[in-house]
Image (cartoon, helix red, strand yellow):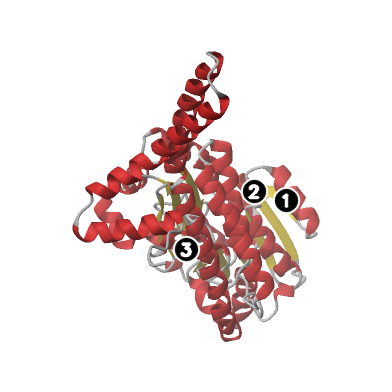
Amino acid sequence: MQLFAFGINHQTAPLAVREQVAFNEDGVENALRNLVENGAAKEAAILSTCNRTELYCNSTQPDHAIDWLAQYHHLSRKDLDPYLYTLPREQAVKHSFRVASGLDSMVLGEPQILGQMKQAVRHAEQAGTLGFLLHKLFQRTFSVAKDVRTQTEIGANLVSMAAAAVRLAERIFPSIAEQRVLFIGAGEMIELNAVHFAARSPKHITVANRTIERAQVLARRINGHAITLNDLPEQLAQHDIIVTCTASPLPILGKGMVERALKIRKHRPIFIVDLAVPRDVETEVAELNDVFLYTVDDIAEVVKDGLDARQGAVKEAEIIIDSGVADFIHWMESREVVPTIRAMRDHAERDRRHEMEKALRLLAKGDDPAKVLEAMSNGLTNKFLHAPTQALNQVHGDDREAFLDVIHRLYHLHPEE
């Protein structure tokens, strides 16, 4: 079993790089199948969020898996390497535990990443790329994350991405209650933001989505109005606050569309939070006057509030994680000797069967049963001791002392007595 993880995140790569290697949720399963079918990994799972793209693999050729990632996104390996972290075996286990526990997040202790990891596992299961090793890894990952959440205060005083977006909006507008809010998308991140903004009772709420049905479901929950993405060019100018997070591989809001909206608004400001990776808003929009555009990375400064109160829980969480890592590595090592144990048992079984067949033939001939049993037990003893005795006689020098120590431990021998 060759456990290996690699990827990039908000700590190693800027948003402009992260969006180049992000996986669309609809395409993750095909990507996983492609990775395994190419022989780069025996098992694989992909975790792709706004803050990270990571691959967890059972692979004897880690470099091939990294090459696959670069090629899949039409990048050269040298362009990816400066931002990449590679985590073999124990490091991969610890990283998985820390990510799921919220210790590696932009928002320390945020719970959303756990759900995103579970979704990554479901995609791997559906793609048929989640084998015995990764299943066990993620099963243990979720158990450790639960222990961290319940036994520490890692989530105390948490400022979420959604709460941070509200705080930023309140810096621009004196009262959100006087503003009209537009949400683009209808996924989990938008739902979280919608709940936070709705709590401020804005003047009007609109939900825009590719499919009107999903937009209507969310709009009903927050007393809003639903539209499709095709309605955005006409509807955009009516809104003061825009929060967007879709899975679109291309921008939803271009510079031209926003410019037209500003003219209609007579340059009243627009506040935009783009939480998507790849970005939903063209980068040139930030150059426009009267537009306040924040990306997912810009939110980082706001979410630092309450960080000190959670730092004390980090040490406790790390202790829980280290213990979990030790347990998992022990399990992996025990699994690695299974083929050897199986081979030893098969070898012993062949010897046992040979001696049994010989004994049965002698009994069928009418030989004394006591003598037959004695001969069979002697034969088994000689066969079982032949290999270690022969190896002991052939070993020399320092190896002999080490081998003797193994024999003593194996057979519980105490020659000094």
Residue drawn at (41%, 33%) of the image: 37
Q: Amino acid at mark 2?
A: Asn
Q: Earlier in the sequence, mark 1 or mark 3?
A: 3
Query: Separation of disc 2 and disc 3 at Cα?
Result: 35 Å
Q: Quadrant of residue 184?
A: bottom right
Report, in whole angstroms, how far the alpha carbon at label 2 lies from the one at label 1.
Answer: 8 Å
Q: Which residue is mark 3?
A: 95
Type of amino acid at the residue the image marks with label 1? Ala
| Quadrant assignment for the C terminus | bottom left
Pointer 1 residue: 226
Q: Is residue 145 left or right of 254 when viewed as pictured? A: right
Q: Nearer the viewer, residue 160 or 280?
A: 160
The residue where tag 2 is placed is 209
Q: Position of residue 136 (x, y in %)?
A: 56, 50
Residue 131, x across and y down, in percent? 52, 41
The residue shown at (50%, 21%) is 357
